Image: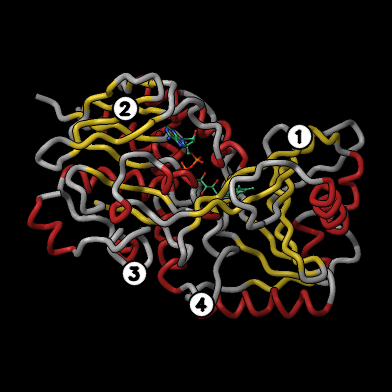
Amino acid sequence: MARKVAFVGGGVIGLASAWRMASRGWGVTVIDPTPGRGASWVAAGMIAPLGEAEHSETAITRLRIAGAGWWPDFAADLVRTTGMDIGYSMTGSIMVAVDSSDQLVVEDLASLHHDLGYAVKHLSASACRALVPSLSPGIRGGVELPDDHHVDNRRLVEALIESCTNVSVSFVRDRVARVVFGHDGAVRGAFLGSGELVDADVVVMTAGAECGAIGGVPVEASPDVRPVMGQVLRLRPTPGSPDVARTIRGVVHGRPCYIVPRADGSVVVGATSEERGFETTVRAGAVHGLLDDARTLVPGIDEFELAECSVGLRPASPDNGPIVGWTGAPGLAVATGHYRNGILLTPITAHAVECLLTGDPLPDALLPFDFFRPGAARGRARSRSDVARTGA
Ligand SMILES: Cc1cc2nc3c(=O)[nH]c(=O)nc-3n(C[C@H](O)[C@H](O)[C@H](O)COP(=O)(O)OP(=O)(O)OC[C@H]3O[C@@H](n4cnc5c(N)ncnc54)[C@H](O)[C@@H]3O)c2cc1C
């Protein structure tokens, strides 16, 4: 008989993993009151292994680069099976500096790219404007990031829901009240807010920033994730607004700002990064700051319609790396903590969840990001060897 898995949370991570497991013949349920409307809906959709790189994050940088490599096949598969356009664009990105200190930040990132083995293409101010004519004449210069792409994350979510539906994933639009364990200690399923039980042999916690708050999970099997608030704007084109030819990442007087184009001419401007717990109120100051920085990069931003201001909660672990693996509670796995890179890491994570549940080896780049590394669990996690003995 087919094994049954329930995903608690249907953001990009839960949906893509559910699609993969149902394609393998498993009975799959995604439990979420509003599938796809968490951080995955708010995100900008950058697939940016290099623009996000930092000197101190070697393993995460390696993971981002490996994760980006999974995207072309994943996107092609999704488009082929759904017939939907997900706005996957491989035009690359550009990183630009506004003042001389910003230029040092950009140069520092370029030296990291060089150390990682990438050919760095420095750009003069006029070369930047040749690539993106709508950039301000005040830009000092920048670097090209030809390997940093983007996808329309909202279309991605819609396509993942469609792909799941096509392979008979069941959607239960409710919250999980608590995960249920049998007398033998193994997972039996999940109780919903309505009181109904969803039976499952395996439960995977994919509830993003709320993964650490799922009821019924022992503290030693609960991931230590916190929400990092991101405020973001969506601007719609008007007849007078400029074309933004590719993703612009700017350093604007020390502040990061990005402008990510969509196929219909609209743009996403982001983003703040704030430690405010589960707060989701859009602040006027954030809107002002984002618009101010975006128009420093592209003065024609003034001509767009301000269509949406929204907030998303990035799921962040103490070391900012994802947490993907068994938890030590038999039958209970987790895939969360993708922080700023959940869209980028969707394909490799879905593949890793598939490997985990079918007993295949995980991709090497994800091995440092299991549940048993220090700090990943809220309580003291069991050891890897204990888990091997329980067969979980
Ligand atoms: C402003 C912003 C910009 C970003 N830009 C990018 C970017 O350009 N590139 C990139 O790679 N990443 C980006 N990210 C990060 C990315 O959005 C996240 O890492 C990713 O969406 C996390 O996906 P997820 O499926 O884990 O979580 P989510 O999308 O948050 O999904 C979690 C789901 O779990 C459900 N849930 C919660 N609790 C329960 C429960 N008890 N029972 C049932 N369901 C539950 C919620 O309803 C939700 O639908 C950005 C994030 C933000 C906020």
Give me the C-alpha separation between circle 3 and circle 4.
17 Å
SS under mark 4: loop
On screen, residue 184 above or below 131: above
- How many residues crowd around disc 2 within 10 Å: few (fewer than 14), some, or many (20 or more)? many
Residue type, label 1: Glu
Q: Label 1: which residue?
A: 308
Q: Earlier in the sequence, mark 1 or mark 3?
A: 1
Q: How is the image coloured?
A: secondary structure
**Going by the image, does 201 lie left or right of 292?**
left
Give me the C-alpha separation between circle 2 and circle 1.
35 Å
Mark carried by residue 191: 2
Q: Nearer the viewer, mark 1 or mark 3?
A: 3
Residue type, label 2: Phe
Disc 3 Cβ-to-ligand 1 distance below 8 Å? no
Q: Which residue is at the front of the view, 232 or 281?
A: 281
- How many residues crowd around disc 1 within 10 Å: few (fewer than 14), some, or many (20 or more)? few
Residue type, label 4: Ser
Q: Label 3: which residue?
A: 374
**Going by the image, does 367 lie left or right of 357?**
right
Give me the C-alpha separation between circle 2 and circle 4.
41 Å
Q: Quadrant of residue 52?
A: bottom right
Q: Earlier in the sequence, mark 2 or mark 4?
A: 4
Give the residue drawn at x 29%, y 30%.
Answer: 190
SS under mark 2: strand
